[in-house]
Image (cartoon, helix red, strand yellow):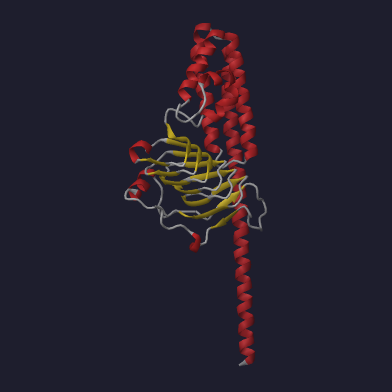
Amino acid sequence: MMDKSLGARLFEERMNQRENERLASKEKKNVVESNETMVERVRYFSEILSLKRGEIEHSLNAAVHLNKEDLPEHFNKVSDELQQVNRYLSDSSLYLPLYNIRKAQEQVQDLQQRSEILEEQLLPKKKFGFKQRKMKKLLKDDIIPCKIEDLVDSVPKKLFSMQLYNDNSCGFADKEDEELIMKDKDLEGKDVVLTNLRRCRVRLYGTPSTLHMTSLTSCEILVGPVSTSVFLDKCTDCTFVFACQQVRIHNNRRCNFYVHVTSRSIIEDSKEVRFAPYNWHYPELEEHFVKAGLDRDENHWHAVDDFNWLALDVPSPNWSVIEEPDRVVDWR
């Protein structure tokens, strides 16, 4: 009996060791596959950006050979192409490393500057009116606390950051100690922007297209299903509850995330961020999940890629899971 018991224990220990080795190998394989996927995404993005840049450069080279009466329409098309590239860059920033984003920004800004200079040479009077008209279309008075006149002479530097604010934008800016609410009819298909809020409670009952949150401090943000992506930058001591396809978290500190996300979350330059599954409820929630096109059964809330942590065999110290006893369950 003693020998049999000892043999059984040795067998059990051996099986447990093999199981632990299998799980470790699987985890390492998942991380390697994730890194390979990232390399492929960067390669694909670079190819598309190179193609778009080539098309714009060709258009700029062709401008010097056009009749003067054809130039206004030609530069309008160039401007539209630049805005398309900026939107592509904004969407891609959710899964690109910061280095690639900054490099792409520089390349696009170089094209913008070249376009501005060429238009100045070929249509000096047209340029000012055209640029001011374009900026009016991009700005929202209740979102961006600046004047059009202050930006007219610095479009190349400002254009990329301005792309988040457009005719489809809504949201809240520059608020303190307020409860802020938006309903379904005001949110559906909108690009929602929350910026420079302090100690605010925000409730968004609906299905935005995108959600951008910057410079939030000690806020509680609850959002219905977002159709596409969520982007956060420079948020501190906040709690976020949202559902989306993909999320990019940049430069955040001491924030909690209750998320339903159908792809892996991405964090960068962030510390002390914690994750738990999405658990907000309101009467129209199920209807809004369907409207947003999100799969209720697919939630990768615990799958997080940290761009600042490349070790394959050691978990990132920058994020953790909120243990069940510590999770908020009643959002009033």
Q: Where 153 sits versus 222, above or below? A: above
Q: Point out residue 130 in the picture as x, y percentages from the top left corner.
A: 50, 15
Q: Point out residue 4 in the picture as x, y percentages from the top left corner.
A: 61, 89
**Residue farthest to the top, as pictured:** 68
Image quadrant in which the N terminus is located: bottom right
Q: Point out residue 332 in the picture as x, y percentages from the top left corner.
A: 39, 52
Q: Where 143 sits versus 233, above or below? A: above
Q: Point out residue 86 in the picture as x, y percentages from the top left corner.
A: 54, 29
Closer to the camera, 196 or 54?
Answer: 196
Query: Along the horizontal axis of the image, is 203 left or right of 92?
Result: left
Which quadrant of the figure has residue 43? top right
**Residue farthest to the bottom, as pictured:** 1
Q: Residue at x 33, y 37 (%)?
A: 185
Closer to the camera, 329 or 90?
Answer: 329
Query: Along the horizontal axis of the image, is 216 left or right of 35?
Result: left
Q: Residue at x 65, y 33 (%)?
A: 103
Query: Along the horizontal axis of the image, is 317 left or right of 256?
Result: right
Tag count: 0
**Residue farthest to the front, as pictured:** 177
